[in-house]
Structures are given as C-alpha cells and as structure tokens.
Image: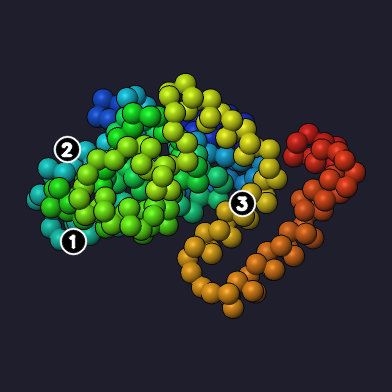
Amino acid sequence: MKYVKVNKTGQRWEIRLHRPERRNAFHPQMISELTQAFSEASRQGPESLRVLLLSGEGASFCAGADLEWMKSMVDYSHEENLTDSQKLFDLFWAARNCPVPVVAQVQGHVMGGALGLLAISDVVLAETNTQMAFSEVRLGLVPAVISPFVLEKLQPHRAQEWMLTGQIFSAQEAQEAGLVHFVGSAQEVREAVEAKLSQLEQVAPEASRTTKELLLRLREGGGFADWRSLCPQVIADRRVSAEGQEGLKAFLAKRQPHWLGGQK
C-alpha cells in the first residue's frame, strides 16, 4: 500500500496514514487502503493481533478530504457521489468493528471525516495543540457519513453545536465532550500511548475481544429484556471457556496466567 503503512511488531499493529505532504488528507486510494488495512486486522486471531495503533505521519493526523478530490466531486453525478460516499462509510464501519482495541494518536489538524476515525477508536490521545472541526457545513456539505459513528462517542449537545457551526475546537474541549481521552505534549502523548498499549497487551486476548463486541452490541440498542438474555450468556460462556478457566485458576493459585507468561 502507498498511502497507508501497516507496521507489525509481534501482536501489536500500527496503521499509519502516510501522506504527510498533504496532511494525510483523504482521497479514494487512501480510503481504499485504510479499509483494506482494518479488514485485514479483523481477520487476525488473538494469537496474531492484540492491539492496534492508528496514527498519522507528519505534522497533522488528517486534514479531512483532499482538495483535489473535492474538486473532482464537483463534476460527479448523483450516482457517483453515492458510490463514493458508501465506500467512505464502509471504511468507518470496518474500523468500528475491528475486534481488537484501537488506540488513536493524533496531532495537528483533525478535520471533517478524520473525526470519524477518532470516533471509531477505543482510546484517543491528542497533543495539546491539536485543532479539530466538523468543517462540512462551511462548504455547503453535511457530516452525514461520520455522524452515526461520532454520536456513539461525542456528547449529543456538543455534536449538534460543532456540526452546525463548523467551528474549530481544541483537544481539551474534545476531551471534555468525550471524544478524546488524554491531552498532553508530544512527549507526554508518546509516553501515554506506550503505557496504554502495554496495558491493553496485559489483558486476556479473547476476553478483550468479547468485551469490545459486547459493548458494540449494547450501543446498537435494545432494552433490558434483550440484555437479560445477552449479558448473562456472555459471562457464562466466558466462565467455561479455556481462557476464563485459566484466568480463574491462575488468580486462585496466585500465579500469572499463560497470556502473561505463566505456565499453562
């Protein structure tokens, strides 16, 4: 892939946007490569992949849509626009449903559709000077494709204000509104990212995946009648699973479980 780099170190992957000369702005090829990268990650088992880092090369994480791509959209037919937008939705859907924890490390500009990448991430760490905006309305457009993903994370009243005004907001404001989890200097963010990745690598890999799947299902709706069936079933399955049995036995025996190097 040319515009997205996937670096694999043991059971840790990094998906890195690689168009720094254009502030990692989206265009069709990058969108296709990102979708491919997340789809590949989703096909990996716990023995191959435990945690995923999403980052952007250079001064900015992602400045939204590429200017040349936007110019070409002016001449698109309605059907071409629909197909184009569906491919973008497919990217966020593939990323949202990645079975392992996704940690995003962001800096510089995070504009328009790039905020969808923050929304699908489980943990977001941003440098203090990061600037963000749902800039679509200022161009006569609508943040339609990313809206369902953003509303899973961002406080609704903040989403409404920021999507309607297109105003720039800070990493600190994004943290207060639930879109970002940690804000600090570049060095502090690097250290916090490494600490978070290490934390996520300490947990039981299948339990991590099951927890993420459960949380996604709960966010998709239902009610207590549905959850009364779902939630007890999930914990019952985990208690009798090989990993669950190993974790309980290791805890009672005061030893490390095998995923932390303990003897099976």
Please state which of residues 3 and 24 is positioned toward the viewer in this rendering: 24
In this view of the protein, can residue 38 be seen by the observer?
A: no
Mark 2 residue crowding within 10 angstroms, few (<14) / some (14–19) / many (20+): some
* Chain-order first, disc 1 or disc 3: 1
The residue wearing badge 1 is 79
Checking the image for residue 209, the label placed there is 3
In terms of image quadrants, where is residue 17? top left
Q: Position of residue 137 (x, y in %)?
A: 17, 51
For the point 63% across and 55% down, the residue is 210
Q: Position of residue 91 (x, y in %)?
A: 37, 50
Residue 255 horizontal side relative to residue 211, left or right: right
* Chain-order first, disc 1 or disc 2: 2
Residue 134 horizontal side relative to residue 155, left or right: left
Q: What is the distance, in whole Å, between disc 1 and disc 2 at their CAs?
A: 21 Å
Return the residue found at the far bottom. Answer: 225
Are discs 1 and 3 less than 8 Å apart at CB?
no
The residue wearing badge 2 is 67
Q: What is the distance, in whole Å, between disc 2 and disc 3 at their CAs?
A: 38 Å
For the point 77% across and 53% down, the residue is 244
